[in-house]
Image: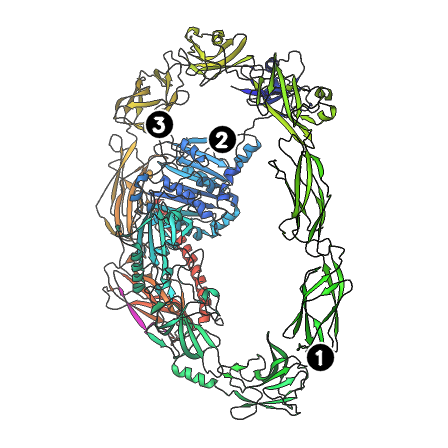
Amino acid sequence: MSIVFVFDRRSGNEPEHFISLGGLFSFSEFRQTVTEDFGLSDQKFVIATTGRVEIRDDDTYERFVDDGTTLYLLHDINQELTAQATERVAFLPHYDTLVKSGIYEYYASAGHNPLPYAFAELIDNALAATAKNSGPREIELRLFMDNDPSKTVICVIDNGKGMTSRELNQWAIYRLSKFSRRSTDELGNTSNESTHDETEDEHIPRSLNSDISYFGVGGKQAVFFIGTSTRMISKPKGSIDVHELLVSKEDFEQKERNKEAIYEGYIRNRKAGDASHLCGNNLDCMRDLISAERGKDQFTAVVITGIPTAHVHYLRYGFNIWCTQLANIYHYYIHGQDGNVATAAHSRAANPLKNINVELKMYSRGQIQPKVLNLRDIEEDMQTLFIRSAANTFEFRAKVEGTGIVEGIIRYHPFLFDRETYPDDFFDPREVEVEDEHDHDYTIPASGRGHHAIFNCFWNGRLIPYTTVEEFSWCAQPKKTKLIPQECWNRISGVLWTNAKFQVSTNKLTFLDLEVRLKDKNTVFTRIINGQERRANIDKQFLDWLKECHEQSDKQVKFSEFKGQITRPALPKNKQGPWAVYEEIQWDGRTYQKGDMIKTCRTAPVLYGRVNRFLLFGDHDGEVFATGGEIELQQEPHYFYDEVKYVPLFKLDRSAPQDVITRAIEEDKSKLPEKLIISWPEGEELKDGEKVPAGRTIGAIKAEIMNKKGELISKLPGSGSSQAKKRLLIELTVIWHSRNGDEIIASHISSHGTNWPYWFKKMENIRKMGPHTLNLQVCLSESGVTSLADTKLPSAKYRFTVTEANAVRFIVGMLDGPFRIGSPFNVPLEFQDMFGNLTKYPASVKPLLAASGLELSYGWSISRGNTLLVNDIVALGTVQTNAGKNFNLEIKILGLEEDSQMLKIRLLPGLPHSISVSPEDPQSIENGESVSFEVEVKDKGQNLTTQPKITVVATFACDGVDGLSTTYFLDCSNTGRGTLSGPPLLLKKLRDPVNITASIDLQGNRDVAAVKRSIIVAPSKHAAVLQLTYRNGDKTVSVVNNKDVLIEAGSFLTHLQFKLLDEAGREIPLDSKLVSKLKVSWVQKTQVGELVQGVLPNIKVPNSVVDSRCVSISIHDSAGDLDFSFTVRPVAGEPACIKAVCSGDSSIRLGHPLKADILATLADRHGNLIKKLPPRALADLQLSGEGLVVEETVRSFGQTSGFHISGIRFNGSELGTRELCITWRNLISYVRLSVIAGPATKLRVADWPEQDEPIVVSNGDKLPPLTVQLCDDAGHSAAEPNVKVQLHKDSALKLTPVSTSLKTNENGKVHFGVFTVHASRGTYELVPKAFIQRSMVSGPALKVTIQPDTNKPVKVDVRFETQRTYSAGSVFSDFIVRVLAEDDMLLDTAESAKMSMIIRKAVGTTQQTPAQGFQAMSFPPDDADSDKKGAFCFRKKPIPEVAGAYEVQFVYNADKSTKIYSRLILLEVKPSVPVTISVLNSPGVATASNARKPLSRLLIRSVTLALNDVFGNIAGENLSGMVEVKVVSETGAIELPQLEGNKHSIEVPLNNGQATLQNILLAENTQGKSGEYCLCCSLLGNASWSTTIPPINIPFFFCNDVKKQAYFTFLSKERDQLNTSIEAYHSLFKTTKQLTTALKCIG
């Protein structure tokens, strides 16, 4: 029932009134109802909305008054509201919640483009939809790219079960998960969208159950992240209708502008192939997609448009990248539980998961053929790289508490000689850049996995990309291990597969609880071997497995002769230690030991030296295999090099001869300086160990340098090295060895000139006391180096000591302030000689102290070294302020040249000594008043003093009085004085005056005596008690503080009187001054005259019983506050209105009682519900209405209030609306009921022609539309929904689509649609039957007569000579093809133009085929059989040139929509005689050098050679022999590079026409000039065939310079890419030529 809410805001604050709109069809009726409800017959008012729009006529009434509207009653439209009013509102989320949900979910994508993850959501839905397919599961992603990004279209198509219109509606509901979709389908059956039985999870390997469409969120987020509009097209299995739903951001915005319901729309139901609703010229791809719907039994297509420009660019130019990401996400769905294991060349492993094919096609404008890629053909995804590079695996299973099961596998990627085989991350490459030869690398190269986690995580078989698990306790790297190297833990990778019992985020990017549950203490891990659990300690099993992998698979450097461990502080913190020390290594069959002379490579300059030891990073304690390490090298000759070098092991030159190393060292040896000659030409020589007084002069110095041969030199002799021809200098330094450390007080450098020797001038500035050293040192001019290798350059040292002189003055040392009156302090005195050096003080020294205004005294003086300390100086005097006062202190010591010092000091007041309190006489106060004292804190000299934390405290005590706990506090820290006061002193039950004592002292200071004062307290005369009464009829009722007062709603509480009593219980006379302090909460102003008489204002009672009013009375006085409060609670008054409603459905069947009950309630004039009614009130309740059977009605009191009416029934034959009138005394209410038809008892077939006569049709014709209607006994259409209706028929009659039971709609109808009949000739019956309340109701029998059609082709029969194997390029034998009609006779009217022969590749072939594909071929018949019409002949049709399995089929095009196919004829086309050799997997042009590293010398990793026939087919089956591989030069070069082992050629076996070349390397340091060469591959003469086959050349580029190799490698890759593009165009041209040839054959 529609209701509006009306507030009367002309005056007052009345609650809202509920006005029913039932029966009010005009403004005048509505205004009359409002007038009566509010009792406004004689008053003027206006009705307005909350937006101040006046409701004044029928137009404004229709526009602005609706269900739930809030209205005002006002004097005029501009009147202000007299009180607040509330308005009901409703709100829905903005459409951006759906449109931008994808942006919010994919914003954090770990630095990657999140588009592949959005596509994955759509593929998840497709996998779930195709889970129950009996045949192949086809999923296709089509991209229609256009130069204009707005015209780009993306389609995701699958052949899954499809969606009904209801399921399509549920798909559109945001966050409607599969658990919430467990609802009933059209047949009333409970449905669950889960694609498998959850109890069977543990039996599905790797949890590959396709149950990955879960939350009802990902699909919507994905389509709106990819684009701005999506079109969902679906056809469920068994349905002839296609359902289509369009959801777009543009549609949402349009609905918002039109103020329409945003989350409502339409599902378009249409026939397959109907594209009539599409408008525009840019929808060609959509029309093609819809046109392809014909003939499909089931499918779903997601069409996305409005693709952003950034997405289009990424999809076009990053095609391989995001395709590889998708292949990694669905790796195990595509390749099965074992993954993409390596298979034979050009073969694809069968998919065990119902043949899942995920194919991606990108159509670009201007290109004839699309770019096609099947995810199963991708071999660069990370899982494939992990699987194919693994040498061994460790499988396990984890059972988590509950039903969670996790399958896991750990793979081992071995180290092979000089590289790790652990795959590099496709999206996070970790390849080391080309090392700079001038960079000395002292770090350990990152090996294997590095800092990556071990386990990738899959949920229900699908990768969750942003969750990885680092490790488990049983597979974590231990702190110490003797048998397994630590780096072996960096060579493992792993995968975890979980079932659906683990939670993932709605965007399927992260797990929510996986790692926590796996690491729970109750989780059980067991190893799996051959599918069986191995019950044993998994920790030990894992270590045994890892040890086995290391010993059998790793190829490393062996470190032996272990000597301990060291740390290297010079390295970064994370590489300082531990370093294991070894004295021997074995590398590639050669042994290196401590003391061996070696040479380095890839260092600048090249180093020669002796091995000190070998260092290996890590905690090792014995022999170990490792991937790298460092050499500690003592560089030779040691005369020049005193530095120990640390060189990475891979920089060791293993090809350097020993004589070359020795010769290089001998050439570097040269002479070094040996002796320094010192002389004093001008006298004043300084002798070693001499004591020198401060200030003495040191004479001039002459120095000379002599080498080992006795020659005077001034520079190093040249040796060709970097340190030759450097000038020698002599550095003079004078060092003072003080107590704080050495200090250089003089430093000079002298160089040797052409005409002068090394010379230093005399020095006169040595005055600091203590030991000194004069040092002369030879050094290099530029670097200042004083030693070379093991030899230190010559030097000379003179040690001497400087002593002090006698004291001539004194100074005052550092004083320790502040200084206070009466507090002792110290003064230190220091004595100095004439140079300012500290010296001893003279004997018999007595200091004299004097200061004006002070009395000074000191205790004693004491000596400390060269310092005299005057102790315990005490000063007494007057200080006016807290800031203190300055005094001049004079100190005099007789006997010195400077005998006195004046010292200015500031003295502050001293520590607290006493407290001064006034007044001293007793004070008198009234109870509840405060007392105060004037307080001063003084020091020993009676000065006011301030100190931190000086707090004066006053406590009070009185004999015989309880509860006196008041304490006064005064902070005198800053002032030293103040007024001590605090809260009032309040004594309980005080009747007579009492005497209390105040004790005043310093808090926490026991050295200051307390002061006591006396106080007299008298009783208080202020108000303490309030008494309140009111009049209730003739009775006077007292009001209790904080209690409720019950009174009728809307009345007044009157005759309120009060009295005030003092502390002693005596009544206090009321006067104007006293009552002026009285405040009441229910009125703003009070009458002083009434208050003086003890009368309070009346209180208005609220109109609603749910409201209450809290009132209070308070008196605010300086002596304290007196509060009195109570609550006024209203109760309901007399009945004033009645309201009746139907408790349920208001529809009533004709002649049947109403199922729902009528509830009538009474309310007073304010709308308060009256719950209690007298027993006689039921007799006053009356009922009336048209056709109402009054005597069958039942009336009773309601459970809580009002009346309960049941048994309502109407008689008559008319249907429609009737009103039930309910009267109680003079109160009336109406209830509107809808009379509908009775229960369904009959069936009626609508619009069926001549139901008594049969309808005559041919086989395959369509029947008229069939509609069945439910009816009651009177023939009225019964609108009973959800009644199951079935169509019973003869078993020999087949209907298309299949007849199924349907449920009636809301009108009681069932539309079976149009059936196509299939049966032999005869008459058949169709009988509709309905199931109503466990009984069956049959409808009229409909008869159908079938007759055969002799002009309708139904079968194509083929006759030919049986031969299953043919040679490529030959011709077929003759085929005789006949067209048969329904009567199994030849169709005379068959036309040869409609008959064709089709040859195409067989589906699922495993034959090896050339790179180019084979297009289907079509041929017309040669002629018709003249003797038999309807028969055709196909003679000498060409056999395909491409070998493989083929299908031959004949098709007859009866009309545009009907094609009749013959049975499939399978045949095998074999290759012909081999004539050439080809490379199956071309490696491109390799670039190699003669370097030491095998990877740099690699020519071919793996290449397969095959024999081919004249058409390019792989031939030579059962043929064997040998293939010779040798290096040749097309330019005629004589010096050719040699293969590994210095061989000119190698031989490779040829088996079944194929030969595999693996790991073809050049020899180390091989000869040859840089240039282009070829590997010539030719067949040897002993091959098992006679035909001469020419050799094939595989080009490569040889570079004898390692630096240039990287550059030529780049150029080779560029050339390979160009060749690939050229081959693609050649393939396109060849395909076009084949199509042209086929068209010519048809023509």
Q: Secondary structure at mark 1?
A: loop
Judge the density around disc 1: few (<14), some (14-19), many (≥20) Cα neighbours within 10 Å: few
- Of the two numbered discs 3 and 1 on the same chain, state the one appearing first in sequence: 3
Distance of mark 3 from mark 1, alpha carbons?
120 Å
**Which of the two discs, 2 and 3, labels the residue nearer the N terminus?**
3
**Amino acid found under the numbered disc labelled 1:** Met
User: Which of pointers 3 and 1 indicates the residue nearer the eye?
Assistant: 1
Q: Residue furthest left?
A: 1362
Real-space CA distance between mark 2 and mark 3, rounded to the nearest whole angstrom: 25 Å
Q: Is residue 1193 above or below residue 374?
A: above
In the picture provided, is 514 more to the left or to the right than 983? left
- Identify the secondary structure beneath mark 3: loop
Closest to the observer, 214 or 626:
626
Label 2 SS = loop
Question: In the rendered image, which residue does mark 3 sit on?
Answer: 187
Q: Main secondary structure of the magenta part?
A: loop
Say which of 1150 and 282 sits in front.
1150
| Residue 1537 within the magenta-colored segment of the rendering | yes
If you read the primary sequence from the N terminus, does the residue marked by circle 1 or circle 2 appear first? 2
Residue flagged by tag 3: what amino acid is it?
Leu
Q: Is residue 292 visible?
A: no
Q: Name the spot of residue 682 as percent of width and height, x first.
A: 67, 92
Q: What residue sits 51% from the left and 85% below the top?
A: 719
Task: Report the magenta residues as a range.
Answer: 1536-1550
Q: Could you tell me the amino acid type at mark 2? A: Glu
Which residue is located at x 42 percent, y 39 percent? Answer: 215
Please say if the residues under marks 3 and 1 sit with CB atoms less than 8 Å apart.
no
Quarter of the figure with residue 1576: bottom left
Question: Viewed as shown, does residue 893 lie left or right of 592?
Answer: right
- Where is residue 855? Give x, y as percent: 74, 63
